[in-house]
Image: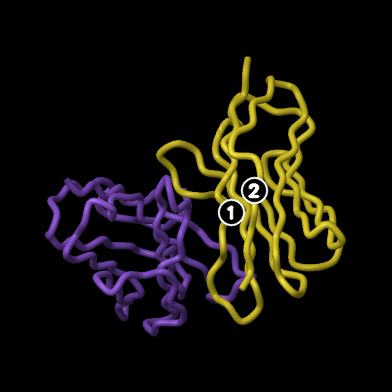
Chain colours: A yellow, B purple
Amino acid sequence: AQSVTQPDIHITVSEGASLELRCNYSYGATPYLFWYVQSPGQGLQLLLKYFSGDTLVQGIKGFEAEFKRSQSSFNLRKPSVHWSDAAEYFCAVGAPGLGQLTFGSGTQLTVLP
Amino acid sequence: DSGVTQTPKHLITATGQRVTLRCSPRSGDLSVYWYQQSLDQGLQFLIQYYNGEERAKGNILERFSAQQFPDLHSELNLSSLELGDSALYFCASSVAGHPNSPLHFGNGTRLTVT
């Protein structure tokens, strides 16, 4: 079965600084990879996804993620964080033949003014 | 707005009771998923339906059941409630129900069992 690890429970960055959120997955082949964001009181919103092809994918709100097969990673990045980016971020993995996604435990992002 | 509607937003009930959570998927989406989010367990997949049929089952307790109706809305029934069932319950929908179909989440129903 596939699994997802987000090693950082909480990250604090200053507004304008760069951001990288880590995600490692476990699956025998190339899975489908996703990043979702959850703002307080809201459901999860899809930021970006990777299925195949170019390993650097662009998403909404200026986010990007890079798939690295050798490291089983799919880290989320943003060059300059805005205060509105403060939220919880979830990495998720899906596998062919399975309908549901498996989510990581989430990383809470705090943005300092 | 994801287009997925969940009702009610909040629910407070006592142990031993039964509740029903409702979800209307995004227009055009055939598949509905239920997830439970709690502080200690994170986001746990409960069950998936596709066009009225159960497609996949996750960590769903026997006290819980769900169904998807012909109009594609879904209900999650939780019975014999325990304190540990207090959580945020999310419904999500997707077009095709395949793992490469992005999920669209509702805002959740927060269940508090006292």
Q: Is residue B29 above or below residue A49?
A: below
The label shown at residue A6 is 2
Q: Amino acid at mark 2?
A: Gln
Question: In the rendering, at what x and y percent does residue B68 appear?
Answer: 33, 76
The quadrant holding residue A29 is bottom right
Label 2 Cα crowd, 10 Å radius (few <14 / some 14-19 / many 20+)? many
Of residues B103 and B55, the one drawn nearer to the viewer in this rendering: B55
Q: Residues within 10 Å of mark 1 (few under 14, many from 20)?
A: many
Badge count: 2
Q: Which mark is residue A104?
A: 1
As measured in the structure, the alpha-carbon distance from the residue carrying label 1 to the one carrying label 2 is 6 Å
Q: Residue A10 at what x, y percent from top left?
A: 59, 34
Residue type at mark 1 is Gly
- As helix, strand or loop, the secondary structure at mark 2 comes to loop
Quadrant holding the C terminus of chain A:
top right
Q: Closer to the camera, B67 or B16?
A: B16
Name which residue lies at 28% across and 62% down: B22
**Residue under mark 2: which chain is it in?**
A
A62 relative to A46 in the view: left or right:
right
